[in-house]
Amino acid sequence: MPVEIRLLAWSCLLGLVHIIAASMSGVQQRGGFAWAAGNREGRTPEVTGAASRLEKASKNFFETFPIFAALVLACVALGRHNTAVVIGAHIYFWSRLAYLPIYGFGVPQVRSIIWLVSIGGILLVMWGLFIKILPYST
């Protein structure tokens, strides 16, 4: 299995972690299990603090993940298994992994830098898709 596909799979798992962290952190503020198990008709109560930040981190992850996934799948489909794609996939995954706790703990400047790094990873994968460079070797 190509490294970039493995990192895509790990990114899918990270997406599930985002969903779980965001939902679990806000349940108590919204009314606990009774609210979570109910019909949730009407307006969803707002959350604050770490719960709010984790919801925003999750939303942000799912804004970038489809682009990353599409690029990785295109690279695999076209046989663009090269250093730029592999390094870009690593950069994306590891920066997104760091992004969740940094955002959850509320470290704004570092959070923004990590976000920029993850975008750099996406751009590197895109570059590896369009530019013919040396194949990646392990």
Image (spheres, rainbow, N blue to C red):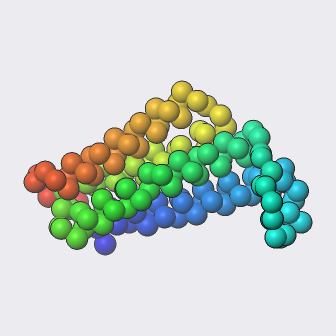
Image x and y of residue 12, in percent: 49, 64
Residue at x 38% of width, y 43% of height? 119
Quadrant where the C terminus sits is bottom left
As rendered, which of 54 and 96 lies closer to the eye? 54
Quadrant where the N terminus sits is bottom left
Image x and y of residue 51, in percent: 73, 46
Residue found at the far front of this picture: 42
Regarding residue 14, the answer to whether it shows in the image is yes
Regarding residue 83, the answer to whether it shows in the image is no
Residue 59, compared with residue 104, is above or below; it is below
Side of 82 relative to 3 (left or right): left
Residue at x 21% of width, y 48% of height? 127
Image x and y of residue 108, in percent: 58, 30
Residue at x 37% of width, y 56% of height? 68
Side of 21 relative to 42 (left or right): left
Residue at x 29% of width, y 45% of height? 123
Which quarter of the figure has residue 77? bottom left
Residue found at the far top of this picture: 109
